[in-house]
Amino acid sequence: MRYNKIRKMDISDGPGVRVSIFMQGCTFNCKECFNPETHDFSGGKEFTDGTIDKVLKLCENENVKGLSILGGEPLHPNNIEGTTKLAKAFKEKLPNKNLWIWSGFTFDKDLKDKEVMKYTDVLVDGRYVDELRNPTLKWKGSENQRVIDVKKSLKSNEIVLLDD
Ligand code: SF4
């Protein structure tokens, strides 16, 4: 598994100052994708235990409110194991900070039973659809995407959108 980049202080991908990591590889090929350099699974850098340690160390900074995992597609079958390992390690080490994940897969159809959801606070789900683009939306690019409160959704067994 590989990743594209880490941002140490990201203020645009989720609330507050965050650490973000962009995983490498995506097969969805959404029209006008914002991040085409992340599509090739052989691009970027190797994702190792050292990468996890580096991300967690950055997240320890008291100004950092949480971790954002984007891509590429962090939950593609090639990437989900590494993303889950990072998510689990993050929540074990920093249980009071929040984890946001962006994925082209959908919560109810593809993701709700995956282990990684146990560690996820917010999931922005669904592929980017350029025809439904709306630049005024918060945390997402197109109308079809959803900002889901994962904890509440798993508890109530229905989709609960983030109350924001
Ligand atoms: S899922 Fe995300 S990274 Fe993949 S093509 Fe669509 S917008 Fe781009």
Image: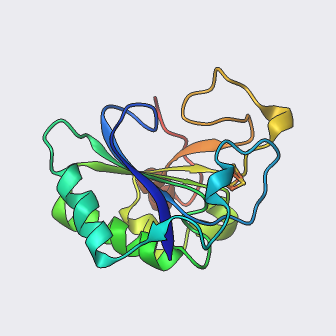
74 lies left or right of 64: right
State whether residue 91 appears in this view: no
Give residue 74's position: percent from left, percent from top.
54, 64
For image coordinates 55% across by 41% down, the residue present is 161
Residue 60 or residue 140, whichever sits in front? 60
Give residue 48's position: percent from left, percent from top.
35, 76
State whether residue 86 appears in this view: yes
For image coordinates 73% across by 45% down, the residue present is 33
29 lies left or right of 111: right
In this view, the residue farthest toward the right is: 131
114 lies left or right of 61: right
Residue 126 or residue 33, whichever sits in front? 33
For image coordinates 70% across by 66% down, the residue present is 109
Give residue 116's position: percent from left, percent from top.
44, 70
**Is 101 drawn above or below residue 44 in the view shown?**
above
Number of numbered discs overlaid on the protein picture: 0
For image coordinates 52% across by 74% down, the residue present is 80
In this view, the residue farthest toward the top is: 136
**Is 141 drawn above or below residue 91 in the view shown?**
above
Residue 153 or residue 109, whichever sits in front? 109
86 lies left or right of 131: left
- Please say which color scheme the image uses: rainbow
**Is 147 drawn above or below residue 76 in the view shown?**
above
Give residue 35's position: percent from left, percent from top.
64, 47
